[in-house]
Image (cartoon, rainbow, N blue to C red):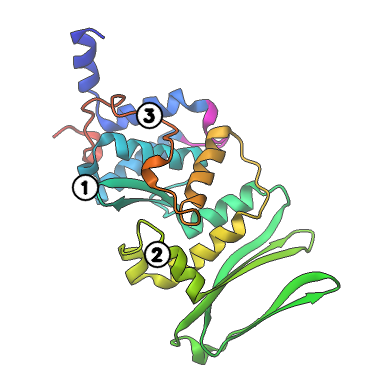
Amino acid sequence: MSKNEVAEKKEKTFDVVLSEKLDASANALPREFNKTRFVTNAMALLSEHPELKNYGPSQVMNGLLRGAYLGLDFINSDAYLVPFGDKLSYMTSYKGMKKLARKYAVRPVHDIYAMLIKAGDTFTEKVANGIPTFDFEHKQENDDNAIIGAFACVVYKDGGVMFEKMTITEIEKVRNVSKAKNAMAWKDFFGEQAKKTVLRRLCKNIDIDFESVEMKKAWEEDTDIDFEQTDAESVPDPTIDDDSVIDAEVVENGEEE
């Protein structure tokens, strides 16, 4: 690469580099992907969270591209960029997981959800006509009681049902092997994290047909990380290396500082 080419590349702002990366990855993006909206929302995210640029443009770019592959919107809380020490990791949210399961499940989904089980609630697993099912009863008076578990359920359009249940001990076990076990999400929003954890386990049993290999890879790397004690540094990066966004600034509104 000549000095002029290097200089030209250094002058590109982050939004321009992101747009170019999306163009280069067009075959890996969802058919209905809106590049303009994604870039606009990505820059809005970086404007609202300027601390993200402390992790460098490569890590931010990689995280954003994983979300792009899945067609998820960071501004709408479909996905997050989460700091783990000196690393910035991509994470699909509870809302994003529901969205993907609904859209790409081979067996059409009518509804998919997760709920907390509080002390005093009744959750009974049973088999009806040879098919596993459950009864759940929650009373409003139990709302402030301790969380003792969570369950997730998918209801298919053909009437079939599949569910997963986890005790609080199982949920805490997953938390303890997570790199983000002491993150604000677990400390301040334990209930939401518990629902996401059991929904992740359910989604591993749902047959999902993604549009591209990159989309499938981004999904599997995210959903596997909490259940297989995967070191985030060992997960192959599906997009770019550290030299591919040389000196591109992560700045507000796409303007250089």
Marks 3 and 2 sit apart, C-alpha to C-alpha, by: 30 Å
- Residue density around tag 2, few if under 14, some if 14–19, many if 20 or more, within 10 Å: some
- Residue 232 vs residue 10: left or right? right
Q: Which residue is mark 1?
A: 50
In front here: 149 or 65?
A: 149
Q: Earlier in the sequence, mark 3 or mark 2?
A: 2
- Residue 44 vs residue 111: left or right? left
Tag in front: 3 or 2: 2
Which residue occupies 35% across, 63% down? 181
Tag in front: 3 or 1: 3
Which residue occupies 51% across, 70% down? 170
Local SS, label 2 = helix
In front here: 249 or 116?
A: 116
Local SS, label 1 = helix
Local SS, label 3 = loop
Q: Position of residue 11 (x, y in %)?
A: 20, 22
The answer to which quarter of the image holds residue 185 is bottom left
Marks 1 and 2 sit apart, C-alpha to C-alpha, by: 29 Å
- Residue density around tag 1, few if under 14, some if 14–19, many if 20 or more, within 10 Å: few
Q: Identify the amino acid type marked 2.
A: Asn
Q: How many marks?
A: 3
Q: Position of residue 131 (x, y in %)?
A: 80, 69
Q: Which residue is mark 2?
A: 176
In the picture as drawn, the residue positioned furthest to the left comes out as: 257
In front here: 69 or 55?
A: 55
Q: Which residues are magenta?
A: 27-34
Q: Position of residue 37 (x, y in %)?
A: 42, 39
Instruction: Give yes or no for residue 89 being in the magenta stretch.
Output: no
In front here: 200 or 141?
A: 200
Name the disc covering residue 256, or none: none
Q: Which residue is mark 3?
A: 240
Q: Identify the amino acid type marked 1.
A: Pro
